[in-house]
Image: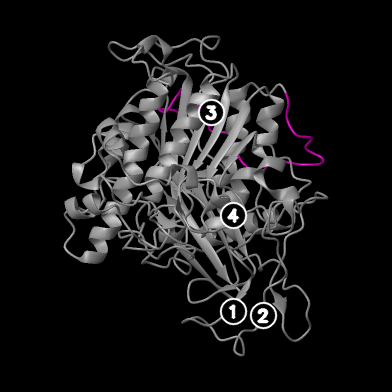
Amino acid sequence: MTRLIAFLCLLPVAGMTVASAAERSQPNIVILMVDDLGWNHIAASQPTMGTFPTYCRTPHIAKLANDGLSFPHAYAQPNCAPTRAAMLSGQYPARVHNSVYVVQHLNRFGRGGIAKSQAQFRGPEQSEDVAPAAVTIAEALRQNGYATAHIGKYHVGGHTGEQTLPENAGFDINIGGFRQGHQPVCFATERDGTWQFRDVGLGHFDRFAAPYDADYVRRRDLPDSLVGTAKHISDAIGDAMEETVRTLAAGGKPFYLQFHTYAVHGPVRARPDLKESATATTNKLKEYAGFIAGVDENVGRLRAVLDDPDGDGDPSDSIADNTLILFTSDNGGTHASNAPLKGIKGMFTDGGIRVPLIACWPGVIPPGTVTDRKVHAVDYYPTCLDLAGRKWTPDADVHPLDGESFADVLRRPESAEQRGPVFYLFPGYLDRRARPCVVVIDDIDDIDGKRYKQTYDYESDAWELYCLTDDQGEERNLIDAEPDVAAALSAKIRTWLTQEHPTWQPRYPLEKSSGEPAGPPPVLETAAD
């Protein structure tokens, strides 16, 4: 999320030249989205508020944070597909061109959650793909003169036909992207004399599947013990990334690249040397830590190829200073504790929806900075448009954007500018992790700008209220203690859900008895009422 057209007001740090708007207009943009990486599952102090676990070893990600701007309060949707749909469309699921509320469908009962027979509601129908009629972020940037590419997991195209695949949704290059939600295997295998990653990414990574050879190991400074062993998918996707960046850099246009890794979605299998070097105390955590370390290597590889896209060692060819890297995840962690945050992937507690976010753009974003601003996945789209110059934008009558640009915060991280409320509507069931609810996260000016989170649960017809500023673990329910805050936030939810626009068609849980939508939750009364 780090795109800066200009750095007009910040004084340069020592030894750094601040770029003018003309010099840094239309930067290259790379969004590196990791799959299922928890908010603090990276060894970097700024984006995790110093809470990362000791088993993490991510020196390249730590350097990215030291060189850039961290957003410790970034949010996504609770699992993979809805976050990717929000980012691609710039819209909440309540828009008709999105309508992706969850992976698969909205009636995933059982598995420790409420039984179907006991539920008062059933989930409505939803989409698994961003609609063909949507104007995707790739299509909008292409209209602004960008070349576009996607590598890796896509998940929100191809369920209903080829028209929603990346190559038909604005991407000039697509490597691996279709409806697939995770990698079935992590290591290449040989079949009939050909090495392949079985059933991964339409076979697009098979050309990178040959076993490690001495030249590859030497070039990347990997252990000699890997020579002759099976290739790991994280290395193959990194190979594809290097090739794609070189192609884009030679194309004469600014570029937008979605580099969406399969790691760290299960199956969790690390490259053997990375697992062996992990300091975790259990085999499961060593595997996970090694898997994360493979992501970290790809962060280093990305920065290296931006520094030297021609591979000739000539620093004058570097495009790093005109490239914004946004490093993030698609949802909360699921393979290890997200403490001090509560919950895991799939939940609407912060452990399920809060994600790491680092923005790095050398010479534009001041190094080692941190902002308190909230960010949500829908914000990438308008931010990218701002950085691209907004010569073309989608018609607000046809494809309105729900996100808020944070381009100015990238220019001035010390700015006190805050985002408006972040909202969630979930009209269905996701095993033990989620059931029908509405959520709002907002800063209350009248209470020292403190950040509150309020949730309405349809099953119990009850509210919960937490002050995230004082209680990020969501342990102390303040719904009775702070009625005025609760009333104000419930009114904001009602206003959000009942806004009028042809594309705004929120789907509510359906009453079992009548089949009718339950509608918005009630507005609470203030203490004075």
Q: Is residue 419 above or below residue 111?
A: above
Asked if the residue at tag 1 contacts the one at tag 2, i.e. Cβ–Cβ closer than 8 Å, the answer is yes
The residues tagged by marks 1 and 3 sit, at their Cα atoms, a distance apart of 39 Å
Q: Is residue 122 above or below residue 442?
A: below
* Residue corresponding to mark 1: 459
Q: Callout 3, which amino acid? A: Ala
Asked if the residue at tag 3 contacts the one at tag 2, i.e. Cβ–Cβ closer than 8 Å, the answer is no
On the rendered image, what quadrant is the C terminus found in? Answer: bottom right
Numbered circle sitting on residue 407: 3
Counting residues from the start of the chain, the first of labels 2 and 3 encountered is 2
Q: Which residues are magenta?
A: 392-416
* Residue corresponding to mark 2: 121
Q: Callout 2, which amino acid? A: Phe
* Residue corresponding to mark 4: 155
Q: Main secondary structure of the magenta part?
A: loop
Numbered circle sitting on residue 16: none
Which element type, helix, strand or loop, lies under badge 4? loop
The residues tagged by marks 1 and 4 sit, at their Cα atoms, a distance apart of 30 Å
Query: Which residue is painted at 59% across and 89% down in the image?
Result: 118
